[in-house]
Amino acid sequence: MFRLISKQKILAPRLSRSYIAGQFTGQKKANGNYTVTLIEGDGIGVEISQSVKDIFAAAKAPIDFEPVDVTPLLIDGKTTLPQEAVDSVNRNLVALKGPLATPVGKGHTSMNLTLRRTFNLFANVRPCKSVVGYDTPYKNVDTVLIRENTEGEYSGIEHTIVPGVVQSIKLITQPASERVIRYAFEYAKSINKPHVRVVHKASIMKLSDGLFVSTAREVAKEYPDVKLDFELLDNTCLRLTADPDDYKNVVMVMPNLYGDILSDLSSGLIGGLGLTPSGNMGNKVSIFEAVHGSAPDIAGKGLANPTALLLSSCMMLRHMSLNTEADKIEKAVLDTIASGPENRTKDLYGSSSTQHFTEQIISRL
Ligand SMILES: NC(=O)c1ccc[n+]([C@@H]2O[C@H](COP(=O)([O-])OP(=O)(O)OC[C@H]3O[C@@H](n4cnc5c(N)ncnc54)[C@H](O)[C@@H]3O)[C@@H](O)[C@H]2O)c1
């Protein structure tokens, strides 16, 4: 029944040593600006995108936004992005994205998943930093987490063996592990935190997480100046919530599901998803997004907090080496939040509208 495969054939491919992904290679136009694809998104997406556009214009950031429609098309039963949107992202190599609602019962795959798959966005980077002036039980949180974005428990390989017994396959491959781990090493160097921590559960999932761990050991040989250590996921949850201070100088990297859960846990430490930016990084293209949803309950009411999208746009500017503009906008956003509840939106226990908050940021640029 089983065909014997020679040992030679099942050897994993060699690690490709020269491969560094996620670097922005876009070019300025003749007017000195870069074009960035803008996916405004659904619900509050329009309001928070307007805030970003107004603040970027006031800050004279060298960005021309190119808005695209990503209303999904169902082609041969497959959720597909409109070609114009795909062309825009491929041309500009960078996009800023508001929240996209996932239609329930319409047969569409989540557009967020479709975007990740279409552009092969393999690493999700989620920094979490305490916002001065907005108190939570945790002080001075400053963590960075990188989540493998394409496989693991999200491979979608599930089947019923017999009624009442289902099987879900967690797929871990060396190439996907390698590119996200390599990205973590490069990112750690770039933010001057030369310490990578692999979060895993190889004590139980010896082969799958074991491959992730052994790949990290291999990649680490190319980065003698970056410290590498390992931590079991349950231990990380305990230690991160007990004292996030221990994670200030490390970059965590982990398989998909662990990253999904631990990134929301980290957001909770600083006050929630409304304050948390993120970047989805690919070989060629990167998409920066607010991680919260479309908030249909407050859409159109002028109550939305644009902070997460604004901080994501600052991550995007740094990715494009526009650090001065990113620092300027980020400082104005954080100073506005710190200035008091009259300038904060309702989700941060304030009384400000989206527009007033935006104007306050502009006045501090
Ligand atoms: N990345 C994404 O695009 C993304 C992420 C999560 C959910 N979604 C989609 O968004 C839709 C709504 O999802 P949900 O209601 O579960 O989650 P949600 O994040 O939209 O809302 C949860 C709660 O947080 C509030 N909230 C969220 N963002 C806010 C902001 N910027 N300012 C002020 N308040 C804010 C909402 O008012 C709501 O009370 C769904 O269709 C879901 O699929 C999209």
Image: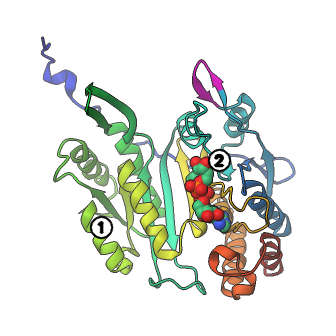
Residue 188 visible in the displayed image: no
Residue at the disc numbered 2? 100
Which quadrant of the picture is home to ligand 1? bottom right
Mark 1, other Cα within 10 Å: few <14 / some 14–19 / many ≥20: some
Q: Image quadrant of residue 242? A: bottom left
Q: Residue at x 28, y 72 (%)?
A: 238
Q: Nearer the viewer, residue 254 or 291?
A: 291
Q: Overall secondary structure of the magenta stretch?
A: strand
- Could you tell me residue 68's position as x and y percent? 77, 41
Is label 2 within 8 A of ligand 1 (CB to nearest ligand atom)? yes
Instruction: Pick the quarter of the image with the N terminus.
Output: top left
Q: How many marks?
A: 2
- Could you tell me residue 150's position as x and y percent? 44, 40
Residue 177 is left or right of residue 235, and the answer is: right
Residue at the disc numbered 1? 236
Rendered image: mark on residue 259: none
- Could you tell me residue 334's position as x and y percent? 66, 79
On screen, 194 above or below 151? Answer: below
On screen, 91 above or below 205? Answer: above
Query: Is residue 244 magenta-colored?
Result: no
Q: Earlier in the sequence, mark 1 or mark 2?
A: 2
Is label 1 within 8 A of ligand 1 (CB to nearest ligand atom)? no
On screen, 126 above or below 69? Answer: below
Residue 99 is left or right of residue 62, and the answer is: left
Q: Secondary structure at mark 2?
A: loop
Instruction: Pick the quarter of the image with the C terminus.
Output: bottom right
Residue type at mark 1: give it: Thr
Q: Image quadrant of residue 296? A: bottom right
Query: Is residue 77 magenta-colored?
Result: yes
**Which range of residues does the magenta coloring cover?**
74-80
Q: Image quadrant of residue 207? A: top left
